[in-house]
Image (spheres, rainbow, N blue to C red):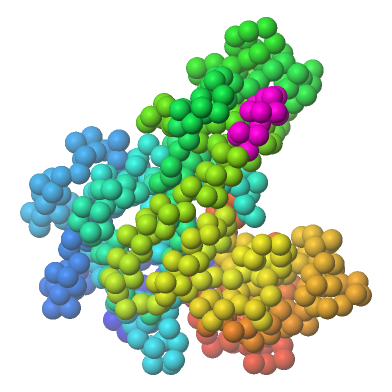
Amino acid sequence: MSENIQEDIKQEIREARVQLDKKDVDYEAAMATKLSIAKKIFAREKESILNSKSFLEFFSENQEWLKPYAAFCFLRDFFETSDRSQWGRFSEFSKEKLEKLVSKESLHYEVISFHYYIQFHLHLQLSEAAEYARKKGVVLKGDLPIGVDRNSVDTWVYPNLFRMNTSTGAPPDYFDKNGQNWGFPTYNWEEMSKDNYGWWRARLTQMGKYFTAYRIDHILGFFRIWELPDHAMTGLCGKFRPSIPISQEELESEGLWDFNHLTQPYIGQELLQEKFGASWTIIASTFLNEYQKGFYEFKEECNTEKKIASVLKSFLETSMLVKSEEKLRRKLFDLLQNVALIKDPEDLRKFYPRFNIEDTTSFKDLDQHSQNVLKRLYYDYYFQRQEGLWRQNALKTLPVLLNSSNMLACGEDLGLIPSCVHPVMQELGLVGLRIQRMPSEPGLEFGIPSQYSYMTVCAPSCHDCSTLRAWWEEDEERRHRFFQAVVGSDELPPDQCTPEIVHFVLRQHVEAPSMWSIFPLQDLLALKEDYTTRPAVEETINDPTNPKHYWRYRMCIRPLCCLSVPHPPPKEETCTCDDGILA
């Protein structure tokens, strides 16, 4: 704790540490406490800090992003929402309005300068931590997210750089059979290219001040992104951007003419009865119109996923129907997604095959010729015709990132991987990621660490999936297959992931040819039985299948101080570490 902090505030910090020392992070309480304490310290030292040489240098070097950020934070708190459409005359960003708002003569300058102050201290603390780590032979690896929040300072200041009527996600994969919808807008690459991707270059330059390496989240997004309409809630009915669509002329030349059948939800009475049983009539009367005997279409007020969710909520509040909202919503979404082709909203003569097209009754009810044509076009769209375009796209954007700093770039290349990805990564000297349970090699259920290439980071798990212990406990049959194929034993595996199994898996990764082995802290602590008392499922950091998943996992650093001793010290002994809850 800094010697400059006065004793009354030090005591408040000590009390807060006790109050916030819980199994999981209470983000709201922690942030409120930190901000309250920071404001008290700011009130006492603002004059000396804001006029100091070090602050003025920091401000001069960072004002291009610092001013808009401070203004954004002020407006967000003043209007009690980050939705800028609610900000009146500040809804649209302008430099003139910004300069007036952040001016020293502004009535709000003290609040604005508080945000400067916070960013200045965060800069000092991260710089100090990075330098200390380097001196100890440790490097910090940063993270470059694939997207920004729809209601963020970036989309407020640079709305032209984002396709605000779209959402980013991923098609169905290992994580979620319905695909993922992350909720943030896709990039307007054409607009970004006009200043040679200056927005990206600025981000990488800033990161390079603190980090020695960085992870490019979802590097596939720099080849192509899975783009969804902003009214979607799931990730199934998207299309790749950029991509070469299927033209109406192509379809007509193959003898496909019934575009209503192909592009509109194909909903027959039989399907409704199958999904909703005796309740099908009330569901149909609420959400659908019968446009021809036995066939239905969604009403205008229910023809998107978000509209369905809204109407369903109101319907269940007044209906006598006792059903799970989540299950009903999923079944209604299934109806909406029961299409063979997705029409391009910007060019109605262009189409995209729905992912897993053969699972739809829209496809199954077609004649054999039409099915054969669509299967061929589906394979061509997803696995052939885009390769050259995607390679070209990546070679325009990725080199700009790589040349913006001296950091080592590692690409997170998991998911549905086009064949052009790994050759481009090798060409550019990008390090890939290998997670044993998600092998990139076709036909394998489990990766073989001894066969990984040098230009990879290998790990048994990561923040986007369950820990090694949780994964082990999730699926008994898979556990048996892993024990036989990877451990090399025909015996029955234990129900729990013992320290011996963890040691075996981690050793495999340490001995792999990969440049780096990086382990989640939870997997390292699983080497010691004393630190596996918490249910394994609670140690998962992120659930990518749930866009509303709330990260709350917390590791108190106290156990880490005790790893070198056989057992944690008794409670009456004083641990010499801070628990870090306010760090």
Residue 567's x, y, as percent?
Answer: 72, 88
Q: Is residue 367 above or below residue 378?
A: above
Task: Decide whether residue 373 is among the magenta residues.
Answer: yes
Location of residue 338 (image quadrant): top right
Q: Residue at x 59, y 84 (%)?
A: 513
Q: How many marks?
A: 0
Q: Is residue 185 above or below residue 44?
A: above
Quadrant housing the C terminus: bottom left
Q: Residue at x 67, y 36 (%)?
A: 358
Q: Residue at x 40, y 64 (%)?
A: 144
Magenta stretch, main secondary structure, is helix
Residue 6's x, y, as percent?
Answer: 31, 77
Residue 53's x, y, as percent?
Answer: 13, 78
Location of residue 129 (image quadrant): bottom left
Decide if residue 360 is in sight here.
Answer: yes
Q: Is residue 492 above or below residue 193?
A: below
Task: Decide whether residue 195 is among the magenta residues.
Answer: no
Q: Residue at x 67, y 25 (%)?
A: 366
Q: Is residue 188 above or below residue 111?
A: above
- Residue at the farthest left position: 105
Residue 166's x, y, as percent?
Answer: 41, 39
- Residue at the farthest front position: 253
Location of residue 24 (image quadrant): bottom right
- Residue at the farthest right position: 491
Residue 329 or 60: which is nearer the viewer? 329
Residue 426 or 75: which is nearer the viewer? 426
Residue 498 or 191: which is nearer the viewer? 191
Q: Which residues are magenta?
A: 362-375
